[in-house]
Image (cartoon, helix red, strand yellow):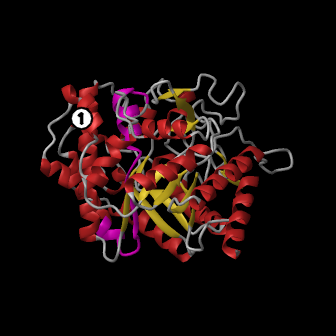
Amino acid sequence: MNFSHNFTWGAAAAAYQIEGAWNEDGRGPSVWDVFSQTPGRIFEGHNGNVACDHYHRWREDVALLKALGVDAYRLSLSWSRIMPAGTGAVNEAGLRFYDELIDGLLAAGITPWVTLFHWDLPQALQERGGFTHRDIADWFGDYATVVAKRLGDRVNHWMTINEPPVVIGLGYQEGVFAPGLKLDHAGCLAAAHNLLRAHGRGVQALRAHAPGPQQISIAHTSREPVPATDAAADIEAARQRYFACQEERMWNLAWWADPIVFGRYPEEGLRNFAAVLPPITDEDMALISQPIDYLAYNCYSGSKVRAGPDGTAEEVPEGWGIGNPRGTLPWLSIAPEAIYWAARWQTERYQLPIVFSENGLCNTDFVHLDGKVHDPQRIDFLTRYLGAVDRAIGDGADVRGYFYWSILDNFEWAEGYKDRFGLVHVDYPTQVRTPKDSYFWYRDFIAARKAE
């Protein structure tokens, strides 16, 4: 296989999805506390108040990561656990929790990769406008400064913000995620611009206050168009669609990534969205384009496209076919080609190494009568997707790491606890953890790669 010996093998999770302890030890409420506690927002009225109780059970979870044999664990921090009002006073108990967790990871030989913001904005900041307020950049920079000063002596791998298209697209445009707003396109573009400015301020804070060499990125995601055939026309049409800026939805990858890497928004988007753009200054673009060290990307699925008569991409009506393999969420068709082309096209365009910061399958997993959790579909998924990553590396993509999403079954946002992504099954009423068959498969796969 093409994986190098310094390839990073990991697993991931996010604070609100696993920590619980939503109102303990000085933590302030986040937008997801408010959203999930609002009737009608979440499947069957679930919320993240307890989740996987990781706040109290982190030692057990670190032991599971150690036994898995991963090199790294991607975690996120709860902003409102560290700064309950989002700005101002710092909560020592919250920082101490992350101190202990990171020390525990390092003692287990696991490198922490820390995401500063994975959607759980302090509610106090949302009440001041959240990402619609230009000051969000300075609020985020202050928070990043606190984190860097406290944890930066032990953390050297960072992601500022997780999945901007979800933050703005699902949270501010479609209203199906916290904070549940439905802004027009102009409002969303202004919020997106502020998010990118916040990212830049976060990068500055990490560079200034975290000692030692830092590896910093932002975790992007998008919608992968997959060429229907190996014909050059189909491949080029899919590539152009991948970086196009045509839709008013917030999933245009280049709209998020180009300003960071190139210091400018894509010309196509500037033309198409000209009537609704916010003010964009040179100072803003200099802030947004603070240098990053690698690309972080969350990749799950894709849609099949082909070149139309004029060479532009068109959806293949039958897609992946009737009855195609898929996860339990409707958007997750199993399409390992998506991760292959994401690796190829992004590293070609942006000339930076890429790390897959999330990839995984949701399934209807349960403990069988033999006391085990058999999930052959997830093993097949991993085999296909890791094979596609291996192929991309062989074809020249500079892929440096892979984080399976997720180490634990957890609170799956608006879907509550219905859909399970974990390598470890969590029985939520009892909090009993049961490693699935896929956990042991991934353990053995990692060990075999290290032995090659």
Q: Position of residue 130 (x, y in %)?
A: 26, 39
Where does the C terminus fall, quadrant-wise? bottom right
Where does the N terminus fall, quadrant-wise? bottom right
Residue at numbered disc 1: 270
- In magenta, the rendered stretch is 148-176
- Extreme-right residue of the structure: 370
Residue at the image point whose x is 41% and y is 38% from the top: 166
Mark 1 residue crowding within 10 angstroms, few (<14) / some (14–19) / many (20+) = some
Q: Quadrant of residue 394?
A: bottom right
Give the amino acid at mark 1: Leu
- Decide which of 92, 234 is in the foreground and name it: 234
Q: Secondary structure at mark 1?
A: helix
Does the image show residue 279? yes
- Please give the count of numbered marks on the rendered protein: 1
Q: Position of residue 19 (x, y in %)?
A: 50, 52
Q: Quadrant of residue 441?
A: bottom right
Residue at the image point whose x is 72% and y is 42% from the top: 365
Q: Position of residue 22 (x, y in %)?
A: 44, 47
Residue at the image point whose x is 41% and y is 45% from the top: 163
Q: Is residue 160 magenta?
A: yes
Q: Position of residue 437 (x, y in %)?
A: 76, 54
Q: Is residue 364 magenta?
A: no
- Decide which of 103, 85 is in the foreground and name it: 103
Q: Is residue 337 above or below residue 447?
A: above
Q: Quadrant of residue 95?
A: bottom left
Does the image show residue 125? no
Q: Is residue 33 above or below residue 147?
A: above
Q: Is residue 374 above or below residue 363?
A: below
